[in-house]
Amino acid sequence: MYLTKQCLFLKDKDMDDTEQKSKKTGKNVFWGFIAFFIVFATVDAFFVYKAVATHPGVVAENAYEIGLNYNKIIEESKKRNHDTNVTTDTPPK
């Protein structure tokens, strides 16, 4: 294989251009990541603000206890509905 000094010089020059391009690309990738996370954090902060500002989240003060006693509450309501059925006796004619 025959290489002259001029070919080696051109080859080194091409490598320098490629390295410079990759450095520029590396900076772009870095700033792209930074921009992505800034946008992500901004949108996330906006959603947290909207969630906290619009609904406090409290439906009932004792929601946990109501959930634990849910089956008992259903049984009691069925008993109340069953007990309230009024039967009327009509007098014989």
Image (cartoon, helix red, strand yellow):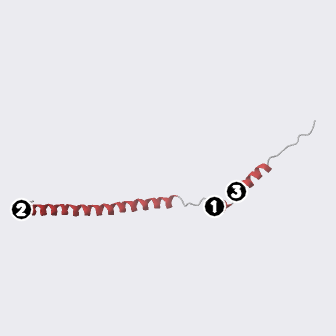
Which residue is the site of mark 2? 4
Image location of residue 32, percent across then percent down: 30, 60
Specify few, some or many for label 2: CA neighbours under 10 Å numbering under 14, 14-19, or 20 or more. few
Image location of residue 22, percent across then percent down: 22, 62
For the residues labelled 2 and 3, say whether their Cβ atoms are less than 8 Å apart. no
Task: Say which label, 3 or 1, has the lower sequence index.
Answer: 1
What whole-number distance in Å separates the C-alpha atoms at marks 3 and 1? 14 Å
Query: Which residue occupies 13% across, 63% down?
Result: 12
Three-letter residue code for mark 1: Ala
Task: Say which label, 2 or 3, has the lower sequence index.
Answer: 2
Image location of residue 68, percent across then percent down: 67, 61
Query: Which residue occupies 60% across, 59% down?
Result: 59
Image location of residue 88, percent across then percent down: 85, 43
For the residues labelled 3 and 1, say whether their Cβ atoms are less than 8 Å apart. no
Where residue 38 sits, quadrant-wise, is: bottom left
Q: Which mark is residue 63?
A: 1
Which residue is the site of mark 3? 71
Where residue 36 sits, quadrant-wise, is: bottom left
Three-letter residue code for mark 3: Asn
Where residue 13 sits, quadrant-wise, is: bottom left
In the image, 85 versus 18, the foreground residue is 18
Specify few, some or many for label 1: CA neighbours under 10 Å numbering under 14, 14-19, or 20 or more. few
Front disc: 3 or 1: 3
| Side of 92 relative to 86 (left or right) | right
